[in-house]
Amino acid sequence: MFALTPLETEAIRLSLLVSAWAVLGSLPFGIACAWLLARVSFPGKVLVDGLIHLPLVLPPVVVGYGLLVGLGRRGPIGSRLFDWFGITLSFNWKGAALASAVIAFPLLVRAIRLSIEAVDPKLEQAARTLGAGPFRTFFRITLPLMMPGLIAGIVLSFARSLSEFGATITFVSSIPGETRTLPLALYALTQTPDGEAQAFRLCVISVLLALAALVGSEILSKWMTKRA
C-alpha cells in the first residue's frame, strides 16, 4: 500500500496551500487584466501586455530575487509592510504563494483573455442596449460564456504553482514545514545521501497531482461547455 510519509504529507499540504492561495489571490487581478487587454484599447497596451507576460520568459530566479529586493524585510515595500501592518512575506508560506502567483500569472491572464476574446462583443452590446449596466453585463453575459477558458486558466495557474521552484527558493528559501513545497522537498532529497528513493516517490506524487489537475480541468471544461 502506498502510504505517505510525514515528509511527503507536509510537502503536499504546503504545495496545495501555496497553490490554492496563489490562484485565489491572483484571480481577480487576472480577470481584470485579461478583460482590459481583450476589450480596451489604450496607449501603451503593448507595453502592459509585455509586462504581464514578463515572468513567463524571465528566469524564475530573477523573479524571486526581484521579490526579495522589493518585498524583503529591508526592501522599499517589504519594510513598510512590516512597519505599518506587521506583515512579512519573505521566508514564509505567504511569500511562497506570492512567488507562485507571479510566475503563474501570465498563464492565467492569457487563458482568460482568449476566452473573453471568443465572446461575441455584439452580445454584450445588446445587453447594454437593453439597459444592463457594465457589471451586470459582465456577470450575466460575459462570465458564463468565458467560463471554460476561466477554468482552464485557473487549473493551468494551479498546476504551474505546484511546480514552482526557482522564484520560491530565492524569495522564501527552503524551510521545512514552512516553505518546503514538493519541488523544494524533492531538490533537498536529491542533495541528501540515500535520498533517491524518497525523491523518486515525491516525483511520482508531483506527476500524479499535475495530471489530476489537468484531467479535472478537461472534464470540467467539457461539462461547462455542454451547459453553456
Image (tube, rainbow, N blue to C red):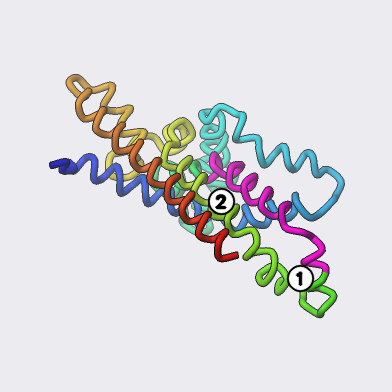
Q: Amino acid at mark 2?
A: Arg
Image quadrant for the N terminus? top left
Q: CA distance from mark 1 to mark 2?
A: 36 Å
Q: Nearer the viewer, residue 135 or 75?
A: 135
Residue depth check, mark 1 versus mark 2: number of the one nearer the observer? 1
Any part of residue 95 in sight: no
In this rendered view, identify the residue nearer to me: 153 or 42: 153
Residue at horizontal 68 percent and vertical 52 percent from the top: 34
Where residue 164 sits in the image (x, y, percent)?
45, 36
Is residue 35 toward the left or the right of residue 89 in the image?
Answer: right
Residue 25, percent from left and from top: 52, 55
Residue occupied by mark 1: 134
Q: Tell which of 137 and 95 is nearer to you.
A: 137
In the rendered image, residue 140 lying in the magenta stretch gets the answer no
Q: Which residues are magenta?
A: 101-125
Rate crowding at label 1 as few (under 14), some (14 to 19) or many (20 or more) other CA atoms within 10 Å: few
Q: Quadrant of the C terminus?
A: bottom right
Residue at label 2?
80
Residue lying at the far left in this picture: please name it: 1
